[in-house]
Image: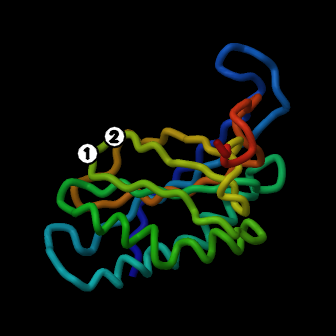
Amino acid sequence: MVQLRKKVFVKEVITADQLGQPCAPISRVAALAVVRNPLAGTYTEDLSELFEIGALLGEELASEAIEQLDGEPASYGKAAIVGVNGDLEQGGAVIHPKLGAPMRAAAGGGEAVIPSNAKLGAPGCAIDLPLGHKDNPWSFDHFDTMTLNIPDAPKPDEIVLCLAYADGGRPIPRCGKGPIKT
């Protein structure tokens, strides 16, 4: 059973690059869920209880995030911050085995691997959630990052589950469209 303490949504609408050069608006939305870590303070080979957290929250968070996008989802990513009484593998268990399917379904597809990140952290720590194109893993224009945190989470016995979508790539990308052959 998932014990959800709260959900947080972060929406960014980017209208210029870091130097102030205007660009077509790009919206990025992250959905974060703070849940109790049922395996905090324990070592076990069986992480299936955590797999289910990703499955149960994935569909709800993904649809709520996409509803807030201004356009169609073009890229996605996921991350987890595990409180200090947990272990890094517990974060991986929440975001890997069963979170991807509901994220892809909500985005209307998703041929590419969903970029991810996990870490241990104290309340308020930030995580860099990587974004990549949902169908083209070689779209350099869509390699991006959202830096996320919640001031009071994760507590030592919690996990912060994060997922995000964007309706575009970086503002004014200039790195190319794919592998450069030399």
Write down the quadrant of residue 122 in the picture: top left
Please report the residue visible at 66 percent of the width from the left and 48 percent of the height from the top.
179
- Position of the C terminus by quadrant: top right
Number of numbered markers: 2
Write down the quadrant of residue 80 in the picture: bottom left
Please report the residue visible at 59 percent of the width from the left and 43 percent of the height from the top.
10
Q: Is 28 located above or below residue 48 in the figure? A: above
- Cβ atoms at labels 2 and 1 below 8 Å apart: yes
Q: Does the rendering let one see residue 28?
A: no
Q: Secondary structure at mark 2?
A: loop
Number of residues whose C-alpha sits closer than 10 Å to that of mark 1, classed few (under 14), some (14–19) or many (20 or more): some
Residue lying furthest front in this view? 182
Taking depth in this image into account, of 144 and 87 the one nearest to the observer is 144
Q: Where is residue 131 drawn, in percent x and y?
A: 60, 49
Q: Where is residue 37 drawn, in percent x and y?
A: 29, 68
Please report the residue visible at 62 percent of the width from the left and 70 percent of the height from the top.
60
Q: Residue 125 bears which disc, if any? A: 2
Q: Is residue 73 left or right of residue 130?
A: right
Instruction: Name the amino acid type tagged 1.
Output: Ala
Instruction: Name the amino acid type tagged 2.
Output: Cys
Q: Which residue is mark 1?
A: 122
What distance separates the C-alpha of mark 2 from that of mark 1? 6 Å
Q: Where is residue 2 drawn, in percent x and y?
A: 41, 76
Q: Is 76 located above or below residue 175 in the figure? A: below
For the rendered model, the colour scheme is rainbow
Q: Secondary structure at mark 1?
A: loop
